[in-house]
Amino acid sequence: MMQFSNWDILHNLLLSARWTLLLSLIAFCGGGIVAFILTFFSLSRRPILVQLVRIYVEIFQGTPLLMQLFLTFFGLSLIGIDVNAWTAASLSLILFSSAFLTDIWRGCIESLPKGQWEASRCLGINFIQTMRHVILPQALRLAIAPTVGFSVQIVKGTALTSIIGFVELTKAGTMLNNATFQPSKVFLMVAVIYFVICYPLSLISQYLEKKLHVAR
């Protein structure tokens, strides 16, 4: 059994936490871009696009993230596409987060009064102009808080990427536990680091919800 001081354990966990944060940022930004496009498709007047978005959302919301990671990492290799753990983890989390963000943003837009759409049509404003000048500024106020809140789920979801060999915070904790045989100490530190990352995001979400008066 190797000897590690408390600082050695914490230092190694903090180094691995960098990759947790980076992967979370990639998943959030990439998922946001995909979700933005899918949200526009879901609001279009073309039934085929609406149905395709609905199927996409149902698939990635209705299947475990762990299964999506397995299919991305091992499934793509079966068709001749070799991906490393970084690529598989990023792609899986982007697809997973985009499905939920699409639902959040579409719900915020559809919660606005229908009369605003009708008034825009009466004024001769097209779909793009209506979204840009009328709908999105209001939907943004509703969407900020739940979007920030969902980022907590993305951070916690990165823990599952350890199953495909991606060395982030949870994987580093497992490796340190195997080296030190001190699971209580190691995983308590892991839990504290996750809490330090996620709790401020939860506070920000609650603050924004009150600040923007969403209930009103």
Image: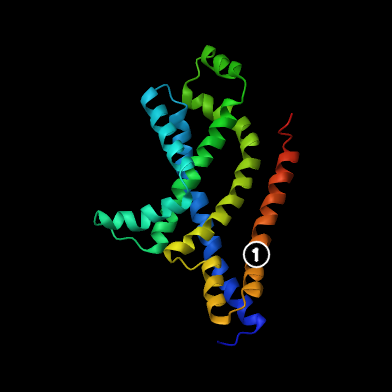
Q: Is 87 positioned to the left or the right of 32 in the image?
A: left
Residue 145 on image: x %, y %: 66, 42
Q: What residue lies at 61% left-to-right and 85% top-to-bottom?
A: 4
Q: Classify mark 1: helix, strand or loop.
A: helix
Which part of the image, by quadrant, shows the N terminus? bottom right
Residue 134 on image: x %, y %: 58, 26
> How many neighbours does mark 1 have within 10 angstroms: few (below 14), some (14-19), or many (20 or more)?
some
Residue 113 on image: x %, y %: 62, 20
Q: Is 195 positioned to the left or the right of 12 in the image?
A: right
Residue 84 on image: x %, y %: 36, 63
* Amino acid type assigned to the residue bearing label 1 in the image: Ala
Residue 134 seen in the figure = no
Q: What residue lies at 57% left-to-right and 26% top-to-bottom?
A: 110
Q: Is 104 positioned to the left or the right of 31 in the image?
A: right
Q: Residue furthest left?
A: 80
Task: From this view, report whether residue 1 is shown above or below residue 165.
Answer: below
Q: Which residue is mark 1?
A: 191
60, 133: nearer the viewer = 60
Q: What residue lies at 59% left-to-right and 46% top-to-bottom?
A: 150
Q: Residue furthest top?
A: 122
Q: Is 211 positioned to the left or the right of 176 in the image?
A: right
